[in-house]
Image: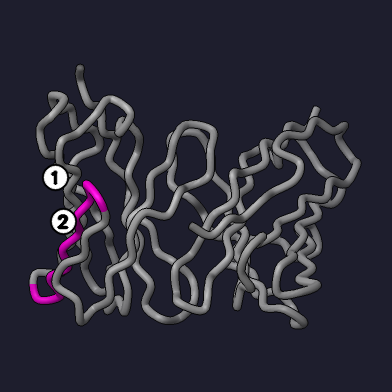
Amino acid sequence: SQKIEQNSEALNIQEGKTATLTCNYTNYSPAYLQWYRQDPGRGPVFLLLIRENEKEKRKERLKVTFDTTLKQSLFHITASQPADSATYLCALDTGANNLFFGTGTRLTVIP
Amino acid sequence: GAVVSQHPSWVICKSGTSVKIECRSLDFQATTMFWYRQFPKQSLMLMATSNEGSKATYEQGVEKDKFLINHASLTLSTLTVTSAHPEDSSFYICSAKARTYEQYFGPGTRLTVT
């Protein structure tokens, strides 16, 4: 069966450290993988898109890797801040138009 | 980044009435727009996919006569919840897919049916 799993439901880290979130998938062949941030009561906010032929993408303090052999994407936030506290969602786009979402990881950055 | 707006951000209506929610891509043309529903502490559930000028494609279990979708242009899609009932109370979120494949979400609409 198809599954998209994010490593943990909740992750707590100390301010200034690097947060690493994991997204593993089975029985999908994504053409693109996207990461979103969602705050309570708000729609997801687009962060990064990485294509199947890209290994890594960066944007400011964010870094995403995509390993289609391992069927895994890692999402890193360096020098984390309390304002980074939110739920982070990975989403797969197989090219069939709609996104398939992971279960989400609730990140809390402790001052 | 690209902006998608939704209106209204929240609405309270009486059971049996209809509610229309608008979704606009403000600074880009969307090849496709999507409507999602989200229950508390759960992930987004896709309701339907719509392309400009054609009928929406609904996911299994979503009643197309209850959730009417109109995709009038490359920047506007509307979702009408007809004859709303309390069980339709939820958080509805639209998204728009850019030609470069990123999908941008609106801020969501909280619907409460009394």
Looking at the image, residue A4 sits to the left or right of residue B78; the answer is left
Give me the disc on residue B22. none
Tags 1 and 2 touching, CB below 8 Å: yes
Looking at the image, residue B6 sits to the left or right of residue A60; the answer is right
Looking at the image, residue B95 sits to the left or right of residue A23; the answer is right
Considering the whole magenta stretch, tell me its main secondary structure.
strand
For badge 1, the amino acid type reads: Thr
Tag 2, which chain? A
- Residue, disc 2: A74
Q: Of label 1 and label 2, which has the lower sequence position?
A: 1
- Residue, disc 1: A20
Find residue B114 and report its horizontal and vertical position in percent. 80, 27
| Residue in the foreground of this view, choosing between B64 and B23 | B23
Q: Residue at x 20, y 17 (%)?
A: A111
Which residues are drawn in magenta?
A60-69
A52 versus B91 height, above or below? below
Tag 1, which chain? A
In which quarter of the view is residue A70 placed? bottom left
Q: Residue at x 22, y 26 (%)?
A: A109
